[in-house]
Image (spheres, helix red, strand yellow):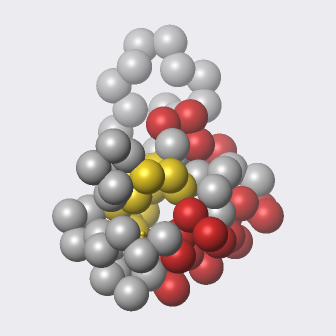
Amino acid sequence: MKKIKVNENCISCGACTAICDEVFTFNDDMQAEAITNNNNFDKLNDSLKDKVMEALEGCPASAIEIVEEKCDCENCEGCK
Ligand code: SF4
């Protein structure tokens, strides 16, 4: 699956959460992160995918990544 991640370069500017608060939020350390239930890029609808790509391309710190990741859950339906 393709997982949405925010790396340590995040400068907490808030652009991604403004563009797509369905996927991005701030954690307790005020670093952006992808919401756990919505961090599987492949499972997002087209509208959300577009917003994530807009946030990724607009991030001033290049902190948003979409990385291929092997799913390690045993009963997963959607990300094998
Ligand atoms: S747009 Fe980039 S730098 Fe700004 S809060 Fe989001 S991840 Fe962090």
Image quadrant where residue 30 sits: bottom left
**In the image, what residue occupies the spot 65% across and 45% down?**
43
Give the answer, above or below, for where 70 lies relative to 41. above
Give the answer, above or below, for where 30 lies relative to 35. below
**In the image, what residue occupies the spot 61% across and 79% down?**
54
Image quadrant where residue 48 sits: bottom right
Q: Give the image location of residue 9, x and y in percent.
A: 23, 72
Q: Give the image location of residue 63, x and y in percent.
A: 32, 72
Residue 68 vs residue 35, the one in the foreground:
35
Residue 9 shows up from this direction: yes
**In the image, what residue occupies the spot 65% across and 63% down?**
20
Q: Give the image location of residue 2, x and y in percent.
A: 46, 52
Residue 74 vs residue 57, the one in the foreground:
57
Q: Give the image location of residue 41, x and y in percent.
A: 56, 53
Image quadrant where residue 32 sits: bottom left
Q: Is residue 15 left or right of residue 62?
A: right
Residue 34 vs residue 76, the one in the foreground:
34
Q: Quadrant of ligand 1?
A: bottom left
Q: Is residue 64 left or right of residue 10?
A: right
Give the answer, above or below, for where 36 lies relative to 59. above
**In the image, what residue occupies the spot 43% across and 52% down?**
26
Residue 67 shows up from this direction: no
Residue at the top extreme? 75
